[in-house]
Image (cartoon, rainbow, N blue to C red):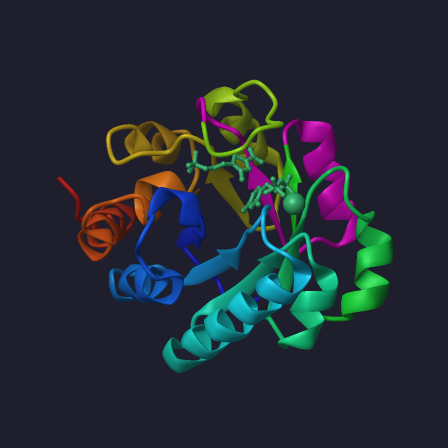
Amino acid sequence: MKDFKLYAITGEEFHPGRDLVEVMEEAILGGVDIIQLRDKNSSKREVLRKAQALRELTKKYGVTFIVNDHIDVALAVDADGIHIGQDDLPLSEARKIVGNKIIGISTHKIEEAREAEVGGADYIGVGPIFHTNSKVDVVDPVTTTYIKQVASEITIPFVAIGGIKLHNVDQVLQAGATRVCMISEIVGAEDVKAVCEKFTKILDGKGE
Ligand SMILES: Cc1ncc(COP(=O)(O)OP(=O)(O)O)c(N)n1
Ligand SMILES: Cc1nc(C(=O)O)sc1CCOP(=O)(O)O
Ligand SMILES: [Mg+2]
């Protein structure tokens, strides 16, 4: 897969009154290089409509597009890939359906990371690093210790997620992460593009 650094997940509850595509376009203009559509509340038809719009946007900018949970929607809009959790379809079954599209898997402990790597995942999510209010059924924070474990052992790309903010991202990078993923800190920002530019600079080693 094309490598990435700054991963934004949609979260419309964090920008009431603002258009989804507009917010995600600002994020891309600020340096986000991969976007995931995550929508826990809409009907399948509505998720499809949003996925079509985000597919068009990400194509325009050459940004990778991932769909969370809905493999059928990902296929319908020709997304670049899917993101699945530990309770979703197993990787081997998902692979039969999506072929060589990107498959990302959430992991919360090293055994899950090893299994994902051996099973042929394209990347793993590593989290939640810190406390997060953006996911209801979330496990306790795994802390930066888990990043260190993954960084020292796992060879496929990994992205840190969960409670990551401008004020704590340094801890995440110091632990060995080179890719970060956020919902609220990005899409809930007053100036989405400016926040993403700050993250981009930090990830490029040019931040303050
Ligand atoms: C990059 C990334 N990492 C982890 C997750 C969490 O996915 P999942 O465990 O499927 O939980 P939900 O997002 O569906 O609540 C993710 N979406 N993206
Ligand atoms: C969707 C999700 N998955 C997580 C995991 O650890 O698997 S943490 C998380 C929420 C991330 O949102 P925020 O950046 O607002 O904390
Ligand atoms: Mg999911």
Q: In which quadrant of the rendered image does the C terminus lie?
A: top left
In this picture, is 131 found above or below 123? above
- Residue name at image x 42 percent, y 50 percent: 12
**Residue 139, percent from left and from top:** 61, 22
Q: Which is more toward the observer, 137 or 171?
A: 137
Q: Which is more toward the observer, 105 or 25?
A: 25
Label total for image: 0
Magenta region, residue range: 108-132
Q: Is residue 92 visible?
A: yes
The reply, left or right, for residue 133 in relation to residue 23 is: right
- Residue name at image x 63 percent, y 77 percent: 78
The reply, left or right, for residue 204 in relation to residue 162 is: left
Q: Is residue 101 visible?
A: no
The reply, left or right, for residue 134 in relation to residue 67 is: left
Judged from this view, the residue extending furthest toward the top is 140
**Residue 156, percent from left and from top:** 61, 50
State yes or no: residue 113 in magenta.
Answer: yes
**Residue 17, percent from left and from top:** 31, 53
Q: Which is more toward the observer, 32 or 201?
A: 32
**Residue 96, percent from left and from top:** 86, 65
In this picture, is 156 found above or below 109? below
Q: Which is more toward the observer, 64 or 203?
A: 64
Q: Splitting the image into 4 quarters, where does residue 34 fall?
A: bottom left
Judged from this view, the residue extending furthest toward the left is 208
- Residue name at image x 75 percent, y 54 percent: 120
State yes or no: residue 80 in magenta.
Answer: no
Q: Splitting the image into 4 quarters, where does residue 116 fall?
A: top right
Q: In which quadrant of the rendered image does the N terminus lie?
A: bottom right
Rendered-image quarter of ligand 1: top right
